[in-house]
Amino acid sequence: MNDFERQMIASGARPTFLVDELHVKYRTYSSGKPAAGEGRSLTARRTRGVREVHALKGVTFAAFEGESIGVIGHNGSGKSTLMRAIAGLIPAAGGAVYAEDRPALLGVNAALLGELSGDKNVRLGGLALGFTPAEVRQRYQGIVEFAGLQEFIDLPMRTYSSGMSARLRFAIASSKNHSILLVDEALAVGDRAFRSKSEARIREMRENAGTVMLVSHSINSILDSCNRVIWIDHGNLKMNGDPQEVCDAYLEQSAG
Ligand SMILES: Nc1ncnc2c1ncn2[C@@H]1O[C@H](COP(=O)(O)OP(=O)(O)OP(=O)(O)O)[C@@H](O)[C@H]1O
């Protein structure tokens, strides 16, 4: 626990989740093409083909009610991995995440099916978010209108452009208020008009959420909306505290 978090506790803030010594590793299979002059046996090739990426190396912090926490870091530093691990979408190789409610990662939780129509996906996605069939019916029109897909809603989703399906996914996921909301800016999608509509929706959800975590490459939007910033660097938590201080240090390192 750092000074910032101690102050939060001293001020009576209630913790909403705790990330405790979190490690995440990815195992990937590269093409396994043997280097010149090396053996060509199948097993040797397979062993060489396995690559392990240690994406998070023991990240620890606590989040509190009413906080909006920005996450910054260079490409590939581990920000999206952190969000996905907190949401429970990828397993921890070590450590754990403890949360008082299920953290929701905006945009990817709705598992949509390409063969089904947009209409059926809205209904399925709503059920997957935990709504009852009656609640899904209640929200249906709002979701379709928000996505702006009224004319296409009876077509299979595989016929949608990537922007159209991303809009529908966003519209479904954001139809629910979450007490722990994770927003990966990489998921903010669509054309300009839809982006500003989705940003407004995110702001609205933040007002209703207990804790929000936001990954962004835009330092301005982080400074505008966060009370705390976490800097992830090569899978390590490099800084955690006052937004201006953390962003200044990050920008200084990026410039150097
Ligand atoms: N599915 C995956 N399989 C294998 N390696 C992965 C996978 N996803 C991410 N990685 C690796 O894990 C590391 C962290 O990636 P991550 O996407 O979390 O970074 P990021 O900080 O969100 O990057 P960006 O700012 O570019 O979105 C990188 O080295 C990346 O190559």
Image: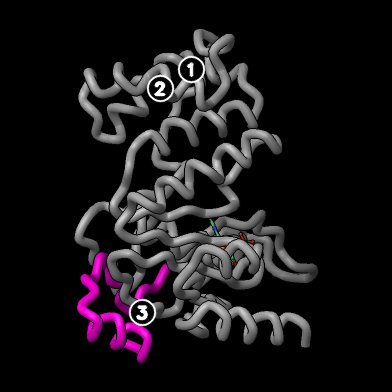
Residue type at mark 1: give it.
Answer: Gly
Number of other residues with Cα within 10 Å of mark 1, as a class: few under 14, some 14 to 19, many 20 or more: many
The residue positioned 30% from the left and 86% from the top of the image is 7
Q: Give coordinates of residue 39: x percent, y percent.
A: 68, 67
Alpha carbon separation for disc pair 2 and 3: 36 Å
The residue positioned 31% from the left and 75% from the top of the image is 62
Q: Residue under circle 1?
A: 118
Nearer-N-terminus badge (2/3):
3
Number of other residues with Cα within 10 Å of mark 2, as a class: few under 14, some 14 to 19, many 20 or more: many
Alpha carbon separation for disc pair 1 and 2: 6 Å
Q: Give coordinates of residue 201: x percent, y percent.
A: 48, 41
Residue stretch in magenta: 1-24
Q: Which residue of the protein is positioned furthest toward the bottom in this rendering? A: 3
Q: Residue under circle 3?
A: 60
Q: Give coordinates of residue 69: x percent, y percent.
A: 44, 68
Horizontally, residue 48 falls left or right of residue 210, namely: right
